[in-house]
Image (cartoon, rainbow, N blue to C red):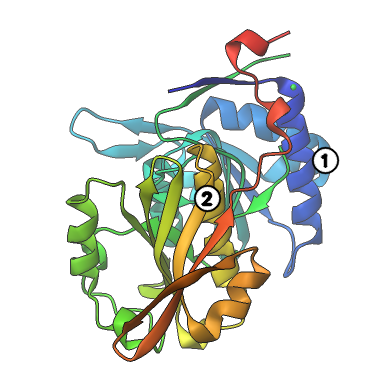
């Protein structure tokens, strides 16, 4: 476990990059900003607000209270009636594990916003829900301290309506699976993937891209060795093909790999998708070929890119 430190200048740089991205995005910048908790409020008002001054009147702060029985209460949720028909940005300033963000998304959906966009300054590699945008990914057991003395925005999931990337759970069992067109993938059930995940000893995890009760895409990976991650499956519904979703899922795997100090990513690619994986930086492992249900798969691998901005996060001994 590592203890990381993020200076104030780094948070300001994150805010600047996020603001520039939001101002350029289509169909438009958010019309309402919700900050979850004290740290998010600081990030929004002190940093993001400086780059989006016209939005200051629409910035609200909400806190999450969790009772002893696990129930979550959102303070100021009555203000959510202002979001109907609007594009809403939800900002998490603490480490995003997913449960608080999921509670807020669920509460917002009942007020029928036009679009929900999510941002996490720091995201755990084992988060239950992945924000659309985020700053840095850290290993599951790492902690981070925000220093008041000062990362680029990564697009984790392309914002589209209320779509979000969530860790697979029992509530997904009745949902229709994304139809990838590959029999070896389409034959598996959500229940089968879920029980494989919770009974695994190698950190196996499945994420699903969910939108309005539908599964648009999914991703499963596990730790192959201490220094590598194996992507077991990555699939996008045929109706969503060509929208860039697969690339966003693979970038999430890359960030998790880097956060967990892995050096390589491995996967089995169906033969007609080899050129696409090559465009993502993968190359073939010679002699490694298997056949599954008359489908030919080739093993491919890629190096985990180094975090070129690693000096933005300081280990204790490196603090000036």
Secondary structure, mark 2, is strand
Give the residue number, with chain letter if any, for mark 2.
264
Q: Position of residue 236 (x, y in %)?
A: 47, 77
Name which quarter of the figure residue 312 lies in.
top right
**Residue 306, can we see it?**
yes
Q: Position of residue 170 (x, y in %)?
A: 20, 61
Viewport quadrant of the C terminus: top right
Secondary structure, mark 1, is helix
CB-based contact (under 8 Å), mark 1 and mark 2 = no
Q: Pick the residue in front: 136 or 39.
A: 136
Q: Nearer the viewer, mark 1 or mark 2?
A: 2
244 displayed left or right of 179: right
Q: Pick the residue in front: 278 or 117.
A: 278
The answer to whether residue 68 is above or below residue 128 is above
Q: Position of residue 316 (x, y in %)?
A: 59, 11
Q: Pick the residue in front: 161 or 135.
A: 135
Q: Position of residue 257 (x, y in %)?
A: 51, 46
Check disc 2: other Cα within 10 Å, few if <14, some if 14-19, many if 20+: some
Of label 1 and label 2, which has the lower sequence position? 1
- Determine the residue positioned at 59% across, 71% down: 277
**Residue 46, can we see it?**
no
- Determine the residue positioned at 73% across, 14% down: 149
- Determine the residue positioned at 81% across, 35% down: 50
What distance separates the C-alpha of mark 1 from that of mark 2? 38 Å
Viewport quadrant of the N terminus: top left
Give the residue number, with chain letter if any, for mark 1.
51
Q: Pick the residue in front: 63 or 11.
A: 11
- Determine the residue positioned at 24% across, 77% down: 188
111 displayed left or right of 133: left
How many numbered tags mark residues here? 2
The answer to whether residue 149 is above or below residue 247 is above
Residue 177's mark? none
């Amino acid at each position: 476990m590592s203890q990381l430190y993020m200076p104030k200048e780094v948070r300001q740089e994150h805010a600047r990059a996020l603001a520039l991205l939001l101002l350029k995005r289509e169909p438009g910048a958010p019309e309402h900003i919700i900050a979850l908790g004290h740290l998010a409020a600081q990030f929004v008002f002190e940093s993001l607000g400086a780059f989006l001054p016209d939005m200051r009147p629409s910035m609200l702060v909400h806190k999450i209270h969790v009772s002893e029985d696990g129930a979550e209460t959102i303070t100021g949720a009555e203000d959510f009636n202002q979001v109907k028909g609007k594009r809403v940005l939800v900002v998490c300033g603490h480490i995003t594990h997913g449960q608080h963000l999921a509670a807020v998304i669920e509460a917002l959906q009942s007020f029928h916003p036009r679009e929900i966009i999510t941002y996490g300054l720091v995201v755990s590699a084992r988060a239950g829900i992945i924000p659309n945008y985020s700053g840095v990914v850290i290993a599951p057991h790492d902690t981070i301290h925000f220093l008041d003395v000062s990362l680029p925005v990564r697009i984790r999931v392309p914002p589209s309506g209320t779509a979000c990337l969530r860790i697979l759970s029992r509530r997904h069992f009745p949902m229709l699976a994304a139809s990838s067109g590959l029999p070896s993938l389409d034959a598996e059930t959500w229940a089968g993937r879920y029980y494989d995940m919770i009974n695994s000893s190698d950190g196996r995890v499945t994420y699903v891209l969910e939108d309005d009760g539908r599964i648009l895409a999914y991703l499963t990976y596990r730790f192959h060795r201490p220094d590598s991650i194996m992507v077991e499956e990555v699939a996008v519904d045929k109706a969503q093909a060509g929208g860039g979703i697969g690339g966003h899922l693979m970038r999430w795997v890359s960030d998790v790999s880097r956060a967990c100090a892995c050096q390589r990513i491995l996967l089995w690619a169906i033969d007609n998708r080899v050129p696409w994986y090559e465009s993502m930086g993968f190359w073939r492992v010679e002699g490694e070929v298997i056949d599954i249900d008359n489908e030919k798969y080739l093993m491919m691998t890629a190096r985990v890119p180094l975090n070129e901005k690693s000096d933005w996060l300081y280990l204790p001994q490196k603090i000036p």
